[in-house]
Each structure stands twice: as C-alpha cells, then as structure tokens.
Amino acid sequence: MFMTHASPSLALNGSRLVRLLSELELAKAPLSHRQFIERLGRCVSITDSITLAQALGRRVETPAQDADACGHDAQSACEAIQRLFVQAHAAMIERIAQTFVVSGEGRIRLPPLPQTPAKLTWEPYHRFYAAHQRELESQIQRLHLQVRDQVTALTPALAQLALLDQVFGQRVAARLKKYFAVTPRLLEKRFDQLQAQAMGGADAPADYRWVEAFCLEMQQVLLAELEARLLPLLGLVEAAMPAAAP
C-alpha cells in the first residue's frame, strides 16, 4: 500500500478540510463568510473582547534601526520568515506522507493489517490519527512562536499585530482543539461505512481494497487539517510581506 504526496500549497479560498469532509458526506455544507464570523464571535467572550481591546491599545516598540540599513534588513528578515514557514510546511507534509507507507519507520506508523478483514477495527487508526494531531499541534505551536518573534522585530505596527495574534491565539486555542477533535469521529463514520460496504461483497473474506481507499482519504483529511491549522500563522507571515516592499 502506498499513498501519494499532496500539493504543499495552502488553500486560501475556504477551508479544504471542510470541503473534503463535505465531499465525503461527513460534514455539513461549508459555512458562508457571515456564518463563520458569527461562530467565531461566539468563541470570544466579553472578557476576551476586553483583553483583545487592551492589546490593540497597547503601544509596542521595536529596536531602533539605522535608516539606511532598514530597507535591506526588512527585506532579509521577511525573506527569512517566509523561508522558515515554507520549509517547515514542506517538512510536515513529507512527515505525513512517510507515515502512510506500510514499511515506514518512526514513532507514528500506519497500523498493520490483520490476518482477516473481519478483525479490522477503527481504534488503531484513531490512535494513528490522534498521534498526528498531537504532533502537528506541537510543531505548529513552536513554528508560530518563532515566526511571531521575528515579526515583532520588524516594525511597531507588526509588533502590535504579533501581540494581538498571541492574545487571540491564547483565547481560542482550547476551542480550536475541541473542534479538531471532531475530525476523528467523522473519519470513524467513514471507516464504518466503507467496512460495511466491503463486508457485504462476495470477496469480503480477502478484500483489503477498501482499507487502502480509506487510508488515502484519511491522508487527504490530515493534510487538509494541516492547512487549516496553519492558516492563522500564514496570515501573520503574509502580513509581514509588505514590510519588505521598497
């Protein structure tokens, strides 16, 4: 069994995770922009709103720079931020792809197939997916801290944006974790659906083809989840790009 690599480009016109789950008939139709704003607003309490407002009003200073070197330094710093993001993103994609190879090595491995399809259960795949989620959460958190520190040093305006990013991220982190926890439950439904269809066939006793199809779908969902998790950080990276303009 082998899985193909996915494009490293991030989906900017809507969440690929929501679209993919919708295509698999595992989630409701994608939210409109208005619905998204309304749901996002419910994630922020009155106390959170006050904290965010205070962060917006806080003046953040960056180290003084020589005017002649400022343009060149900003260009180099922005390129470094972009390079850090792109390289880390590519490494995460490669890491996911490697774990979906049966002969792959490492802490996270694709569950081996049992001797008979009838003994296949969702639990090993749940552990596999949950391990990926924990790893992505940890990796992206470290990357976000690195990017935020570098963005803070560019301009006072970007330093304030980085502060707002930090405060807002702290406020919604727990809620986002809860939302991403829904994905494995949706995948379990897909697993049960494909298994039921396969067990109803004449060749069910020796049929593993549905497992390969499921693993391919699970890989695509995981890659889409990676993109969704990276979107807030991508916004911070893109916000820093104008600082490099002449």
Image (spheres, rainbow, N blue to C red):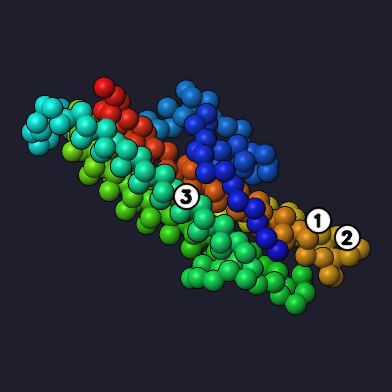
Q: Residue at x 10, y 33 (%)?
A: 65
Image location (x, y in percent) of residue 26: 64, 44
Which residue is farthest bottom? Answer: 115
Q: Please state, as top left, top right, bottom left or bottom right, where the N terminus lies in the image.
A: bottom right
In the rendered image, which residue does mark 3 sit on? 90
Image location (x, y in percent) of residue 188: 63, 56
The reply to whether dot 1 and dot 2 touch (C-beta < 8 Å) is yes
How far apart, in angstroms, are the residues tagged by discs 1 and 2? Answer: 7 Å
Q: Residue at x 62, y 64 (%)?
A: 101
In the rendered image, which residue does mark 2 sit on? 201
Image location (x, y in percent) of residue 169: 31, 42
Badge 1 amino acid: Gln
Which of discs 3 and 2 lies nearer the camera? The answer is: 3
Badge 2 amino acid: Gly
Q: Earlier in the sequence, mark 3 or mark 1?
A: 3
Along the viewing direction, whichever of 230 and 155 lies nearer the viewer: 155
